[in-house]
Image (cartoon, helix red, strand yellow):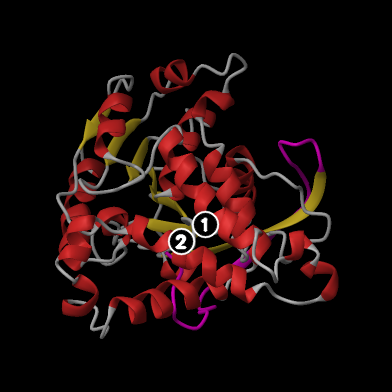
Amino acid sequence: MPSTEAYDRTGITHFDIPSFHFHSGQSLPVKVAYRSYNPTSSKVVCIPTCYGGRINTTLNYTAGALKDYHVVVVAMLGNGESSSPSNTDDFPQKLYYQDCINAQYELLTKHLKVKELEAVIGFSMGGQQSYYWACMYPQFVKRAVVVCGSARTSQHNIAFLEGPKAALMNSVDYEDGAYMTKGTKPSRGLRAFGRAYCAWAMSAAWFRERIFETRLNFKSLEEFIVAQWEESFESWDAEDVLILARMWQMGDVGSTRKDGDYTQALESIEAKVLVMPARTDQYFPPEDSEIEIKSLKHGELAVIETIWGHIGGGGANDEDTAWMDKKIAHFLHQ
């Protein structure tokens, strides 16, 4: 979920691609935002950002499992740090995961001179990017870690996203997109997006146990929704929010193949893959991961036993983070 903290630019650098060819056929100059940790290490790990994530809010494991690795945290296209509707004129109407991976590949190979990746590690949309990396560049990626993500966005997940999208796009101040020509911001619509999104990110048990009070110290559910969800999404650009949601909905590694076969795409992955769904994730449930793992040659399933729902995989709960860190450390040494 988006952070409520002020934007942190610490350590962030940009790589310029003078003419980037988008999956839609359009070509534009783009910039890719990233941050390198421990750049002198020869062992490189790439961590793409998630939905609502920024580079410096992304869980990077550099104090634990990845302390001896060169970790490159990359902002996916569309997130407002790399090229996005909010900062790039004539940005394509549709963005595809292939665009994000190809831009990251150029950053790593042409700019950082990386020869291979020890791993791609991603949470949520970052996890979907991990799957795409393994499909698109099989000789470049040795391992992929998918945390609370999937190789194909489920119908249930697509339907969930329609709710927040509709709340934003039907708001009075969104004006069917006309707000852009007026130089205004659809704050009411963005806050509605966050309110509609909120309940999906955690589990029913999380709300039943009132974690928003007992662990997060909010005085009420309403205070939590306003401060943690309405205000955080209000800090984003509406078109960035929407283009990423649409890309998420279109997620399907089958699209990396000419025949569009999702199962064959999974079966073609040569990398070792660690899939870590959260037990109570409402939109990337472990049942979906159990199906996907059957098509992987070198797949391992490790379920995060948490009541924190989807955000349990993103660093929201220290106990879950410590468990994931140990799993990743072991996986990297197999």
Q: Which mark is residue 196?
A: 2
| Secondary structure under the numbered disc 2 in the rendered image | helix
Against 240, is 244 above or below?
above
Where residue 131 appears, x then y in whole percent?
44, 35
Q: Is residue 129 visible?
A: no
Where residue 228 appears, x then y in whole percent?
39, 75
Q: How many marks?
A: 2
How many residues crowd mark 2 within 10 Å: few (<14), some (14–19), many (20+)? many
Say which label, 1 or 2, has the lower sequence index: 1
Where residue 21 appears, x then y in whole percent?
76, 41
Q: Marks 2 and 1: in contact by CB < 8 Å? A: yes
Quarter of the image for the C terminus: give it: top left
Q: Which mark is residue 225?
A: none
The front one of 32 and 222 is 222
Q: Residue at x 45, y 32 (%)?
A: 152
Hey, what amino acid is under mark 2? Ala
Asked if the stretch drawn in magenta spans residue 120, the answer is: no
Quarter of the image for the N terminus: give it: bottom left
Q: Is residue 171 visible?
A: yes
